[in-house]
Amino acid sequence: MASNQQDTVEVVCPYYAERFGNVREVTSCIISVSSCKPGFGVEQLMDNSMETYWQSDGQLPHLINIQFPRKTSVCHVYIFSDYKLDESYTPAKISIRTGTHFNDLNEIEIISLCEPSGWTGIPIRNIRDKPIRTFMLQIAVISNHQNGRDTHLRQIKIHSPVETTKNQTLDNFNEYSTVEFQQYSTIR
């Protein structure tokens, strides 16, 4: 079930979230796009440079497909766009879809953007407000500003929550690092 949650869109830098150690960037995935101009493809979308961008080539909607090798938890999708530089190429409405493959994708979010400049964070949650576990994520650009035909996206980042076990959490404290304590830290 899709929800128009423009108020949940966050304008933040994904690098800050990674620094705190609660999330990690998902890198073990296959990324494809529905179309691109020569020299403006997936490589430019993922190169960590705000100077380069992916440029679509064709009819709307423009799609970015992210396929994971195993079911993966996803808590945020971040996109970097800049209306001042890209004007009519800047996305105005984005749909986020998840599923196991191309034929069973369900729309979970529809986001409206108003002249974005910088990182836009989109929380990805299920109905219980937990990160979604999925094999495939699709970002669909439904419309652009000024009725533009092609799209520029400068970067995308996908974050997964870092899951810590009780032992990993306790190992962070010096007072629990003695041999005596560690021998009782697991149940056999």
Image: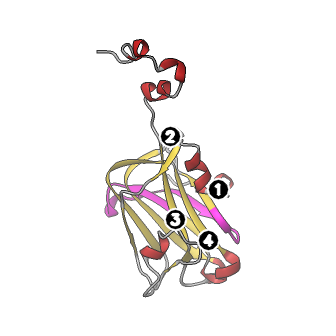
The CA distance from mark 4 to mark 1 is: 14 Å
- Read off the residue under disc 3: 156
- The answer to which of 178 and 160 lies nearer the viewer is 178
- Read off the residue under disc 4: 81
Which tag is nearer the camera, tag 3 or tag 2? 3
- Read off the residue under disc 2: 130
**Residue 136 in which image quadrant:** bottom left
* Marks 3 and 1 close (CB-CB < 8 Å): no
Q: Which range is magenta?
A: 95-119
Crowd band around label 3 with a 10 angstrom C-alpha radius: few (<14), some (14–19), many (20+): many
* Marks 4 and 1 close (CB-CB < 8 Å): no
Residue 103 vertical placement versus 126 (above, below): below
- The answer to which of 64 and 44 lies nearer the viewer is 44
Residue 113 appears in the figure: no
At numbered mark 4, what does the secondary structure look like: helix, strand or loop?
A: strand
- Read off the residue under disc 1: 9
Coordinates of residue 7 in the picture (x, y in percent): 69, 54
Q: Amino acid at mark 1?
A: Val
Judged left or right of residue 110, residue 139 is left
Coordinates of residue 135 in the picture (x, y in percent): 35, 53
